[in-house]
Image (cartoon, rainbow, N blue to C red):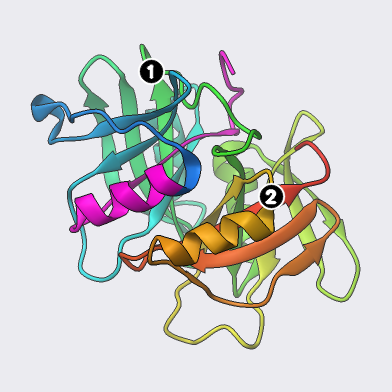
Amino acid sequence: MTSYLHGEPSWIDIGVADFDTAAAFYSGLFGWEIPEGNEEAGGYRSVTLDGRVVAGMSPMQMVPGPPFWTTYINVDSADDVVAKVSDAGGQVLMPPMDVMEFGRMAILADPTGAAIGLWQPNTHGGAEVTNKPGTFCWCELMTDDVEAASSFYSAVLGLTTRASDGPMPYVEFQVGGRSVAGMMARPPMLPAEVPNHWGVYFAVADLDAALTRVTELGGSLLTDVIDTPAGRVAPVMDPTGASINLIQLTIDH
């Protein structure tokens, strides 16, 4: 990847209190290289795979509770998007701010309470590789109000949607007619204490082998493996309490 369109997910990161445990898990599972952090940037680390930047990790816990992965949407202007949030029913959790020379960021909450980041790139354009084993390949909103979320992301980001029917209806967010992220209604079995949220999917070459490795590294499988049109999916939890989805892709996103 050399650039992203306005409205495309372009970056993911996580801040954790137990950084050493998280780093050992993700480097062991995905083969990531995690260099020393930049003190000026609060210890933030740009993770690489085969020499290319793929994600961010930081030895920090910004809010109480378990750590979580944050999805960032590439935007032409973070300020212009933020200006639309209140009228669309959302909330600005972190107003636009410059991140050194790398870009400009903001954090929003949609009307259903799910948090999402904005990234206006400068020298840092986002993940340099996606859809390959060890990299993120899909981001998905799980919400209790699909209609409200659809209206919000259309209003603030210009995303369109395409819905599919089936036992579990699914909505795809699109940019220029191409699907860039997904959305689904909260399943009944999801515990009430789990908030509406954006989840992250990481591609793996062999899901069964990856799940064995997850267990060896101190993680756990959260539910049974799920067969989807895009591939076999396994929701897992890392040893620090952050949840991710692993997928053995059968199609390219």
Task: Tell me what residue is drawn at x 83 percent, y 41 percent.
Answer: 251
- Which residue position holds label 2? 206
**Three-letter code for the amino acid on which mark 2 is drawn:** Asp
Q: Is residue 8 magenta?
A: yes
Which numbered mark, 1 or 2, is in the foreground of this view?
Answer: 2
> Where is residue 249 shown, x and y percent of the image?
75, 46
Where does label 1 land, which residue? Answer: 124
User: Horizontally, is 16 left or right of 251 in the view?
Assistant: left
Label tally: 2
In reply to whether residue 74 is colored magenta, the answer given is: no
Where residue 43 appears, as percent x and y from the top left, is: 15, 35
Query: Residue 109: horizontal and vertical position, in percent?
Result: 41, 56
Q: Is residue 64 left or right of residue 117?
A: left
* Residue stretch rendered in magenta on the structure: 1-28
**Residue at 30% in and 47% down:** 23
Do callouts 1 and 2 mark residues in contact (Cβ within 8 Å)? Answer: no
